[in-house]
Amino acid sequence: MVRKWRNSPQINRYALDRKHITKKQQEEWFKKLGEDEYFIIQAKQEPIGLIWFNHKEGLIETGFYIYKQSRQNSLLPYKVVAMFHDYLFNTKQFKSITCKIQKDNKRAIRFNGSLGYKKQSEDDEFDRYMLSKQEYHKADKKIKILLKAKI
């Protein structure tokens, strides 16, 4: 299911590596996960996306996607990411987390900016954004007020 989602054009076009993933490649990837954590996102017991963090280049790198298009333009992504950030900063005790976003993915840039991420570096295709624990706390208060008002 996850490989099907990841290979779909709607997800693949924003992936860091856009190559088609075979079953064998996915099996090899599973063997190398180590301390990385990946979670299936469910809404009303229906799998709708994936969220993760991994250790890359000495950083904690995060990412997620909502595969189910009917759930993308809602508060659900904010709910999911708010819970995930709580987990990363409060349970895992990370001091900062990062993500890479394609330069042309304006939607992800706006979304992550609203969560407190700040641009840290650029390369030809992607920009790296960082969220510190301090910025997380500032943005999280606003997000939780929004979520309470809309629930």
Image (spheres, helix red, strand yellow):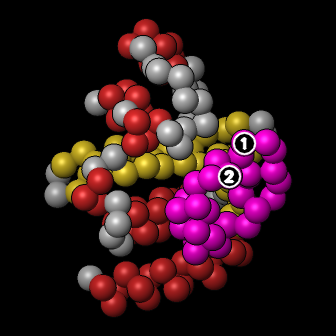
Residue 82 rendering spot, x and y as whole percentages = 47, 68
State yes or no: residue 13 in magenta: no
Q: Where is mark 1, residue-wise?
A: 125
The amino acid type, in three-letter code, at marker 2 is Lys
- Pinpoint residue 49: horizontal percent, then vertical percent: 35, 47
Q: Are marks 1 and 2 in contact (CB under 8 Å)?
A: yes
User: Is residue 19 shown left or right of residue 93?
Assistant: left
Q: Which label sits on residue 58?
A: none
| Residue 35 seen in the figure | no
Residue 3 placement, left or right of 53? left
Real-space CA distance between mark 1 and mark 2, rounded to the nearest whole angstrom:
6 Å
Mark 2 sits on what residue? 103
Q: Quadrant of residue 112?
A: bottom right
Q: Measured from the top left, where is residue 74 in percent x and y?
A: 33, 70
Residue located at (64% from left, 59% from top): 93
Which range is magenta? 102-129
Q: Secondary structure at mark 2?
A: loop
